[in-house]
Amino acid sequence: MLASIAVLGACVSSTFAAEPPRPAVRFDVPAKGHFSLGVYDDAGTLIRSLAYAQPTAGGTESLEWNATTDLGLPAQPGAYSVRGVWFAQPPAITAKMKVGLSGDPPYVLDNGLGGWGGNLGPPMDVCSDGKVVFAAFGCVESHNETGLQLMDVNGTILRRYSSFFPW
C-alpha cells in the first residue's frame, strides 16, 4: 500500500550565512511501515532525499534538513517543498536471471555454448526486459567472443554482435 505523507510545513531558505539554516521538516505518517521523504525546488526537481524507506511507528515525525543538496552542496536560496510516500512493507526486489552459460568448457563451442562474454572480464553493462538479456563487454580480443550479446533468460546466446577491433 502506498500513501502520500501529509507534510505539516514547507522548508524555506532565503539567504545563507556562514552556517546554513537547519529547518525541521514535520510530517504525519499514517501507520506503522516505512517512508521516503524528499525536498523539491520550485521546478519540482528533487534536490535532497531526507529518508529512504525508513522504518516508522506512524504518527508525527520530524527530520532536519541542513539546506544542502544530495551532492552536499548548499541549496540555492528559495522556497522548497517536501513530499513523501509511506508504504506498509519495505521495498523489495526479486532478481531472477542467468547471464550466459559459462564454464563447460570455458571456451566457445561451434554451437555457441560454453564460455560466454568478453574474454578479458565480466560484462560492463547488462540490461533485460524479462524475456531477453543484452550484455556488453568492454574488452574482447577474439573473433569467437563478441562484445555485444543477446541471450534468453536461460543464458543461451541468441545473437552475437561483432565488436572485435583487430589490433
Image: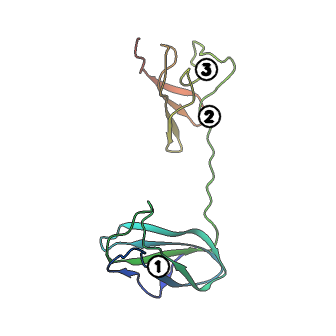
Disc assigned to residue 143: none
Q: CA distance from mark 2 to mark 3?
A: 12 Å
- Image quarter in which the N terminus is found: bottom right
Q: In the structure shown, which secondary structural element does the residue marked by tag 3 occupy?
A: loop
The residue that disc 2 covers is: 154
The location of residue 33, given as percent across then percent down, is 64, 75
The mark found on residue 22 in the picture is 1
Q: Residue at x 30, y 70 (%)?
A: 43
Looking at the picture, the colour scheme in use is rainbow
Which residue sits at x=37%, y=69%? 75
Q: Earlier in the sequence, mark 2 or mark 1?
A: 1
Q: Is residue 21 above or below residue 118?
A: below
Task: Tell me the quarter of the picture where residue 112 sits.
Answer: top right
Q: Nearer the viewer, residue 65 or 156?
A: 65
- Sequence-wise, which precedes: disc 2 or disc 3? 3
Q: Quadrant of residue 2?
A: bottom right
Which structural element holds mark 1? loop
Q: 19 or 132, which is in the foreground?
A: 19
Q: Position of residue 138 (x, y in %)?
A: 47, 28
Residue at 52% x, 37% y: name it: 133
Q: Amino acid at mark 2?
A: Asn
Disc nearest the viewer among 2 and 1: 1
Q: Distance from label 2 to label 1 (Cα)?
A: 52 Å
- Where 98 falls versus 69 (above or below)? above
Q: Residue furthest right?
A: 104
Residue, disc 3: 113
Q: Residue at x 64, y 25 (%)?
A: 102
User: Is there CB contact under 8 Å for labels 2 and 1?
Assistant: no
Quick one: which residue is furthest to the front in this view? 18
Disc 3 residue type?
Answer: Leu
149 or 41: nearer the viewer: 41
